[in-house]
Amino acid sequence: QAQFVESGGGLVQPGGSLRLSCVIPDSTLRYYAISWFRQAPGKEREGVSCINSRNSNTVYADSVKGRFTVSRENAKNMVYLQMDNLKPEDAAVYYCAANTLRSQCPPKFVINEYDYWGQGTQVTVSS
């Protein structure tokens, strides 16, 4: 099964920005909503953001609203997560994922509903 490929992580100071990219491995996944998750050491994986298949609706966790922006370019098989005003608590491994039963973003993030995942990219926020 093909996996998403995330990139763009790295070390950034608090208040800084990063742009994560996610390559959609299979063009059929264009028809599904794509979500970003993150997992910090010792914590559960949590949903961060979602964008529907038509790039017309987005969802954000309360902790990132106003700071993160998700977008996608279906023609390029790409999804992005622009992260601004980063905080130390944003440090985590970030994953993109898809639930192949949904073209719209779910009302809440349920990890077990996602059947396509990437390997993740590390984001470190530290001075």
Image (tube, rainbow, N blue to C red):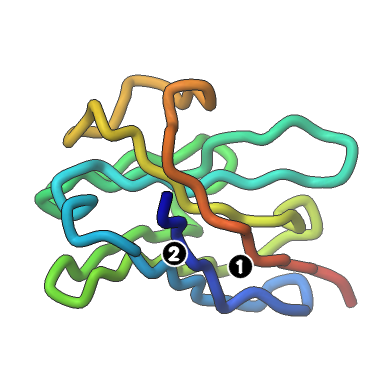
Q: Which residue carries the number 2 mark?
A: 81
Left or right? Give the position of 113 relative to 40: left
The C terminus sits in image quarter: bottom right
Q: Is residue 62 visible?
A: yes
Residue depicted at x 74% and y 54%: 92
What label sits on residue 93 in the rendered view?
none
- Measured along the vertical axis of the image, is residue 10 above or below residue 23? below
> Which amino acid, mark 1?
Asn
Q: Within 10 Å of the Cα at label 2, are there few (<14), some (14-19), or many (20+) other Cα atoms?
A: many
The one of 26 and 43 positioned closer to us in this rendering:
26
Label 1 element class: loop
Callout 1 touching callout 2 (CB < 8 Å): no
Q: How many marks?
A: 2
Coordinates of residue 22 in the picture (x, y in percent):
42, 67
Residue 59 found in image quarter? top left
Horizontal side of residue 127 vs 12, given as left or right: right
From the viewer's perspective, tell me whether residue 99 is left or right of residue 8.
left
**What residue is rendered at 77% in x and 51% in y?**
89
The percent position of residue 35, horizontal first and vertical second, equals 40, 45
- Up-down: is 106 above or below 82? above
Observer-side mark, 1 or 2, equals: 2
Q: Which corner quadrant of the image does residue 103 belong to?
A: top left
The residue under the point 33% across, 20% down is 107
Question: Which of 100/48 is in front?
Answer: 100
Residue found 57% across the figure and 78% down from its top: 8
Real-space CA distance between mark 1 and mark 2, rounded to the nearest whole angstrom: 13 Å
Residue 73 lies, with reference to residue 114, above or below; the image says below
* Amino acid type assigned to the residue bearing label 2 in the image: Leu
Q: What x and y, as percent, mark residue 41?
A: 87, 45
Q: Residues within 10 Å of mark 1 (few under 14, many from 20)?
A: some
Residue identifier under label 1: 85
